[in-house]
Amino acid sequence: MVGPRKDLEDLLAKWEIECPTMKGGEAGRLVRVEPGDSKVSPDANMTIIWLRSRHIPTLAHELLHHLVLTFEEKGIPMNWDNTETMSYYLEYLIQEVLTLWHK
């Protein structure tokens, strides 16, 4: 999601998800929602990425956090031998967001 930080706070409040502590100057934030985190949707299992603006470097930064969490959850090693897999996944994620942004 892209917009003011208040939009993220409002979305999390609507879903009754604890809002992470945020610094005033943040340009982006990743929020991992796991089953049991939301009282409204207890089975929710997702990642929310908030960006203050459509800034590709910040998008890449937050998507890298998502990549690391995903690889850890799936037991995929993060090492030099696996950099091509990581790179393709990051490229795919960025392309998906850019496609949404250009609709």
Image: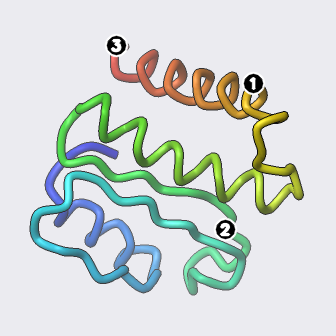
Name the secondary structure under disc 1. helix
**Mark 2 — residue?**
44
Label 2 crowd (10 A; few <14 / some 14-19 / many >=20):
some
The amino acid on which the numbered mark 1 sits, given as a three-letter code, is Glu
Instruction: State the residue position of label 3.
Output: 102
- Give the Cα distance between marks 1 and 3: 27 Å
* Residue positioned 36% across, 80% down in the render: 20
Looking at the rendered structure, the kind of residue marked 3 is His
Q: Nearer the viewer, residue 6 or 69?
A: 69
First in sequence, mark 2 or 1: give its number.
2
The tag on residue 84 is 1
Q: Which of marks 1 and 3 is nearer the N terminus?
A: 1
Label 2 and label 1: CA atoms lie apart by 30 Å
Q: Where is residue 49 in the image (x, y as percent from the top left)?
A: 42, 51
In the rendered image, which quarter is residue 99 located in? Answer: top left
> Left or right: where does residue 35 sit relative to residue 38?
right
- The residue tagged with tag 3: helix, strand or loop? loop
Eye-nearest disc, 2 or 1: 1
